[in-house]
Image: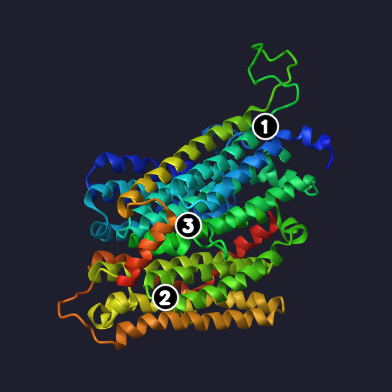
Amino acid sequence: MSAHLPVLQVVVPLLAAPFCLFLRRGRAAWGLAVLASLASWVIALALLRRVLAEGVLSYAIGDWVPPIGIEYRVDVVNAWVLLIVSTIGAAVSLYAGTSVEREVEAPRIPLFYAAYLLCLSGLLGITITGDVFNVFVFLEISSLSAYALIALGQARRALTSAFRYLIMGSVGATFIVIGIGLLYVMTGTLNMADLAQLLPGVWDSNTVKVAYGFLAVGFCLKLALFPLHLWLPNAYTYAPSAVTAFMASTATKVAVYMLLRFFLSIFGAPFSFGVMALDRVLLPLALVAIVSMSLVAVFQVNAKRLLAYSSVAQIGYMILGLSFATATGLTATVLHLFNHALMKGALFMALGCVMYRVGSVHINAMAGLGRRMPWTMGAFVVGGLSLVGVPLTVGFVSKWYLILAALERGWWPVAVLVLLASLLALVYVWRVVEVAYFREFPGEEETREAPWTLLGPTWALVALNLYFGIDAARTADIARRAAEVLMAGIGS
Amino acid sequence: MSLDLLVSHYNYWVVIFLMMVGFYILISRGNLIKKIVGLNVFQTSVFMLYISMSKVSAGTPPILVDPYGEADVLFSNPLPHVLILTAIVVGIATTSVGLALAVRIKEAYGTIEEDEINAIEARTEATG
C-alpha cells in the first residue's frame, strides 16, 4: 500500500470526482469531497516524511520502467508543494460546505465538488509527475475545472472573467506544449530526469532556446507574472469565495513550481542563469509587479479585488527570490510558496465569512464589522499582518529570507524596495481594518458572527500562520533543502 | 533566406502562418465565438507542428509489417502522434467549455460582443 502512495495522491481525488456527480445531493457530495481531500492531505504528509527520511521516491506507472513509461518522482521540492496544495485543499473543502450552499445554486453543488476535486487532482498531478507531457495533461485538467469553478460565481461578470481566463490560460498551455514538443524533437525523451541528462548536449541549438522561450511565456501566463496577470484580478474577484481561497493559495503556486522544475531541475541552473539570463529578465518584472500591483491594490474598493492585486504583487516576491539566482533566494521563494498559501488562504476565507453574513465584500459594506464579527475580522487582521510581514507571522519569515538574499548579493536598493512595498501592504490592509473597526455599523438588522463551520477552517489556517511564524526552523530547513535540490539539478 | 530553406521547411512555414492567424483572430476580434475559433486555429497549428515533426523522411506509417520485427523498415515516430491525440481531446474540451461559457454570457448579457458587454458593465457600475 505505502509503495503506491505517489499514484494514490492523484488517483484518490480523481476517482472521487465522478462519484460526486452520481451522489446528486449537495451534502453527500460535500462529504465525499472532504473525505477525498483529507485522504490526499494524509498521503502528502506521509510522502513528505518518507522523502525527508529516505530521499527521492520513484514510481513507475503501470510498472513501465522510466524513461519509457510515465514516472512519478517525488523529491523534497514537490513533496513540499504537494503538502501545500493538499493542506489548502483539505481546509477549503471543509470550509466549502457552508460557504458554497450560500453562494452556488443547489442543483449545481454536486457539479461544484466534482470540478473542485478535478482541479485538486490536476494540481497534485502537475506537481508529482516526472514526465513533461503528463505535466501538460494535468495542467489542462486543473485549468478546465478552474474555468468551470470560476464561472459558478454569483455575479454575471464571473462568466466573462472565466472566459478571459480560458482564453489566456489556453494560450499559456499551448505555449507550454510547443516548448515540450521542441524539447522532445531535440532529445527524444519526455522523462524529466532523462531530459536533464540529454539537454546539456544540445544547449547550443536554437531549437532548445526557442523551446525555453515558449515555456517561459507559458509559465509566466499561468503564474500571472506582471504583465501577464490580466486574467487574475477579475477571476479571483467574481469566483465563489471558496474557489478564490483555493485558487489563490494553490494554482499560482503550482505554476511557480512548474517554472522552478523546468528551468532549474531540467534545464539546470547553469543554462537558465548562465546562457539564457533568466534572472536578469525576471528581476525587473518581479520588482515592477511588487511595487505597481501593491499601489493598484491600495486604490481598490472591493476587498476581494484588493487581495487579488496583492496576490500578483506577492507572486513578484516569489519570482524575485528566483531572480537572485542563489540558494538563499530560492529558499525564500520556496518558503514563500507555503507562507503565501497560508496567509492568502486565511484572508480570502475571512472575506468568505463576510460574504456569508453581509452579502458583499465591498470595503464600505464592511463598516463596523470589527464588533459584529470579531472572529472573522480577527482572522483578517492576523492574515493582513502576515501579508505585511510583521514578526511572529509567516510573512516575516519570507521577507527575512528575501532581504537576506538581497543583501547577500549586495543589492541594497532591492532590499529597500521590498521594505517599501511592505509599507504599501500595510496601507491596503489598513484600509479594510479602519473601515471595519473605526466606523459605525450602519444597518439596524442584527448581523451576527459567521458560523463555526466557516470560522473553524479559517482559524486553522490563521493558527498555522502564527505557528510557523514563531517556529520557522522546520519550514526553513525544508525550504533550504528544496533550494539545494533545485540548484543541483535533477541528475545528481 | 534561400529558396531551399523555404521549400525544405515548408511544413514549419504553414504552422507558423496558421499560428499567427489564430493568434491574431484571438487578440483582435471582440466576438467571443470568433475568439474561440482563433484559439482553435492556434491550437491546430501546434497539432500540425507535432505531427509533421515526427515524420521521418522516406519512413512508412508506424505499422508492424512482419510480426517478428526482423525486416529493416524505416517508419515515422508514432509517439508525437499519440501525444497530440491527447492534445486534440484537450482542445475539444477547451472549445466546449468556452462555447458553454459563451452561451451563458449571451443569456446573462444578451450579447457576445466584448465591447457591448463592457459597455453594459460600465453602465451597471455607474448606476450602482
Q: Tag 2: residue type? A: Gln
Residue displayed at 30% across by 74% down:
A376
Q: Amino acid at mark 1?
A: Ser
- Residue occupied by mark 2: A300
B13 vs A372, left or right, is right
Instruction: Kindly identify which residue carries mark 1.
Output: B52
- Chain identifier of the residue bearing label 3 in the image: A
Which residue is at 23% across, 83% downward? A441
Q: Which mark is residue A251?
A: 3
Q: Chain of mark 1?
A: B
Kindly identify the amino acid type of the residue bearing the numbered disc 3.
Ala
> Image point 57% across, 34% down: which residue?
B84
Residue closer to the observer: A324 or A211? A211
Distance from disc 1 to disc 2, alpha carbons, whole Å, reads 49 Å
Residues behind callouts 2 and 3 on a single chain: yes
- Quarter of the image holding residue A365? bottom left
Q: Is residue A118 visible?
A: yes
Q: Which mark is residue A137?
A: none
**C-alpha span from label 3 to label 1:** 33 Å
Q: Which element is circle 3 on? A: helix
Q: Residue at x 65, y 78 (%)?
A: A414
